[in-house]
Amino acid sequence: MKIQFLGAAQTVTGSCHMMETAGHRFAVDCGMHQGNAEMEKRNYDTWKYNPKEVEFFLITHAHIDHSGLLPRMVKEGFSGAIYCTPPTRDLLEIMLEDSAHIQEMEAEWRNRKRQRYGKELTTPLYTVADARRVMDLIRTVEYDTAFEPFPGMTVNYRDAGHILGSAFIELCVKENGGGFKAVFSGDLGRPDQLLLQDPAIIKDADYLFIESTYGDRDHKDESTSRDELAQAIAYAYGNKEKVIIPAFAVERTQEVLYSLNLLRMEGRLPADMPVYVDSPMAIRATEVFRKHPKYFDHQTTELIQNGNDPLKLPNLKFTLSTADSQAINAATGPAIVISASGMCNAGRIKHHLRHNLWRPGAAVVFVGYQGRGTPGRKIVDGAQSIRLFGEDIAVKARVFTIGGFSAHAGQSEILAWLTHFTSRKMKVFLVHGELLKQRTLARLIRDRFGLEVHIPDYLEVCTMTPGQPLEAVVDKEAATPRIDWGFLLGQTEGQLANLRQRLEAIESRPWLDQTELRDRLLEINKNLMTLVSEA
């Protein structure tokens, strides 16, 4: 069997592992590429997927970095089956439609700009209609219920404990008179996570494709994370300001609500502090969670049976409309605002940051991974300002980074899950991670388990033949990102225009502002160097 890595290769987005065996072509996951402009260009490289020739997709879970290109595949001719669990199906319905709406809005914005310059109009990556067509192709499967997409291959979905309905996938393949077993972790969850069961245990595989998002470190424990959340709330409440929590609509928002409920029961959530969930998708996702209680863990089930819904709070307000969202920022006084997107690169969270990031008494709480190049990553890395809606917004709020809320297994948890495998000849592929983190994890796996570990590159093709050495080939020319000089030029012109405005503003101002100008010049130089290195 041949496998090509069309995403999540030395990066954390765009998960898609395309396979060919016995005349069949299929893939595990079909995620959107997210991050900088060059990375997102990969979403338009549909020819590399050859959608018309793909028979089916096996989707591990609903996160957009694992499912977000499905509407693009349908738009370009895919008409096969899409397999996933029932909760994943319901989450995909809201997440893909939301993603499609964003694609349409961004295309409309680009076209208004292109019209002014007399340029050819563009089309969205995909439309809401494309996203809805995806739902007609979905076939749901339950955990631990094996099925055959074609004769000679058996598929089994197992609980990955990452988000509601998430799975790792076992593929048993008969090929050339023999057979082998490949396991795809998707995103692996953590033991003792709120709401969900622990990841299922598996003992044997010939090939393991495992995520490595946190391959270089562990997370804080749940109680420490809840303490830090309480500190952030107390800080903003004492200053009569807001707590802004960028959170992914699925799983993270619900986990934060659960944690706030626990703080309320512990007496550490002010009774008069309103809590807003300001994300239509997060609101709909919360309803999906309530629809599938059988996927909850024992503790959550017990809470619900005792009449304590962990996803409800006395002061909880869901804001569906734009007007309700705007009213949050118009209101004074302390509040907790949970809004998407989790990396601050889209959605209503950008408006809340614009209104609160510059306030010294406010708190911004990051509860999830921040991808390279995203606004969230820049804030976490200590940026003095970030650009939102054409303005440079100062970062004066107190920033809290709470790692214990992650739905991904940390380094020790990945290694602990690996201890259950009994085969010493298993080959391990590290996917869905940044290269330096992957190298750290690879070294530990080799040292501790004596297993062969490979870190695939983007567009690499590997041939899997049991008992034979791994053969890997990568098309370097196709995989190497091209420098987008137009993008660089636009960013440079924007920085220079901002500099000209500052020069004009300080002509009649005191000498102190010359220091400000020098610092700004250094910042511009740093930003330009970053742009070049990312491109």
Image (spheres, grey):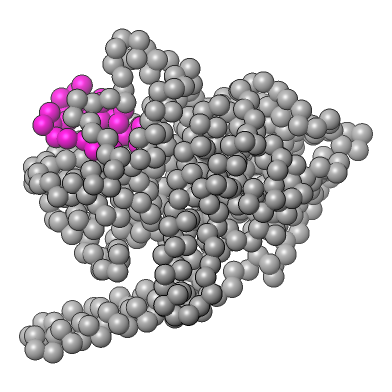
Q: In the visual, does 301 lie left or right of 260?
A: right
Which residue appears at 23% of the width and 64% of the height? 393
For the residue pair 463 and 78, the one nearer the viewer reads as 78
Locate residue 523, reporting x and y percent. 30, 75
Which residue appears at 23% of the width and 33% of the height? 317
Q: In the visual, does 437 lie left or right of 113?
A: right
* Above or below for 403 versus 482: above
Locate residue 97, reporting x and y percent. 48, 44
Q: Splitting the image into 4 quarters, where does residue 527 fall?
A: bottom left
Q: Residue furthest bottom?
A: 507
Q: Splitting the image into 4 quarters, where does residue 328 fall?
A: top left
Q: Residue furthest top?
A: 306
Which residue appears at 55% of the width and 32% of the height? 89
Please check the rendered image and state whether residue 172 is part of the magenta-colored stretch, yes or no: no
Which residue appears at 26% of the width and 55% of the height? 351
Q: In the visual, does 430 lie left or right of 460?
A: left
Please check the rendered image and state whether residue 272 is part of the magenta-colored stretch, yes or no: yes
Locate residue 352, reporting x and y percent. 24, 52
Q: Quadrant of the N terminus?
A: top right
The answer to whether one can see residue 435 in this image is: no
Q: Splitting the image into 4 quarters, where does residue 530 fall?
A: bottom left
Residue numbers of the magenta segment? 252-278
